[in-house]
Amino acid sequence: MENVQTSKKSLFLERWSNAEIINARLGLILMVMGSITLSLMATLIYVVIKPRPVYYVPGASSAGVAYAQSTTLTTVSMFTVAWVLNWSNFTPANVESVYKHAQQFMSPYLLARTKARLKKDLEQIKNNNISSLFSLSQEAVVVRDKEGFNVTVWGDKGVYMGKEEIKLQKMVYHIHVRQSPATDWDPYGLIIEDIAQEVNG
């Protein structure tokens, strides 16, 4: 009987010892995994927050930083399309920030010419709960001239009052863009000099 009890006691102690070893190993594994996870999160945050220079490849055999004085037609197209999409997509809740952002890239001439109209438009948009949705229907066309670039942008524009669609139009924007000194808020070194729009059908 004594032998049986001693055997059971030994078995219990052996299992207890094994359990402690397994728990210690699991704890070590969890610590390692936790350290790896924290390291990956720190690396991800660093990559997201730290600004990076933008590079482009102007030719097959050379590469470098894109400067305003070496502006390509593709850059002008991307800049203008982004501006038009910002300008033409708004709701009563965000229209002020949309217009404020757009005005940062407008020339003093264009600002002076449109300032009064923009103020009137803001009041009308908020009072009547107007929203605008614009999407491109084809690629923009850029033509260089002596004073800058003429850009044509085609798209479909829907105007809504609340959730009700008022009209759906095919729009054409004719925009004149010129180069200007690059700044922190305008790294492209481009500015909207003039804009005209027409309903295409």
Image (cartoon, rainbow, N blue to C red):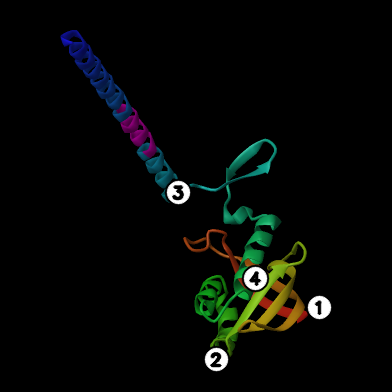
Query: Hey, what amino acid is under mark 4?
Result: Val
- The residue drawn where x is 41% and y is 38% is 40
* Sequence order check, earlier mark of 1 and 4: 4
Q: Which residue was labeled with disc 2?
A: 127
* Sequence order check, earlier mark of 1 and 2: 2
Q: Secondary structure at mark 4?
A: helix
The percent coordinates of residue 44 (x first, y second) are 43, 44
**Viewer-side label of 4, 3:** 3
Cα gap from disc 1 to disc 2, whole angstroms = 28 Å
Query: Hey, what amino acid is under mark 1?
Result: Asn
Q: Residue furthest top?
A: 3
Cα gap from disc 1 to disc 4, whole angstroms = 16 Å
Highlighted range, magenta: 28-37
Cα gap from disc 3 to disc 1, whole angstroms = 42 Å
Q: Which residue was labeled with disc 4?
A: 84
* Sequence order check, earlier mark of 3 and 1: 3
- The residue drawn where x is 34% and y is 28% is 29
Q: Secondary structure at mark 3?
A: helix
Q: Nearer the viewer, residue 58 or 37?
A: 37
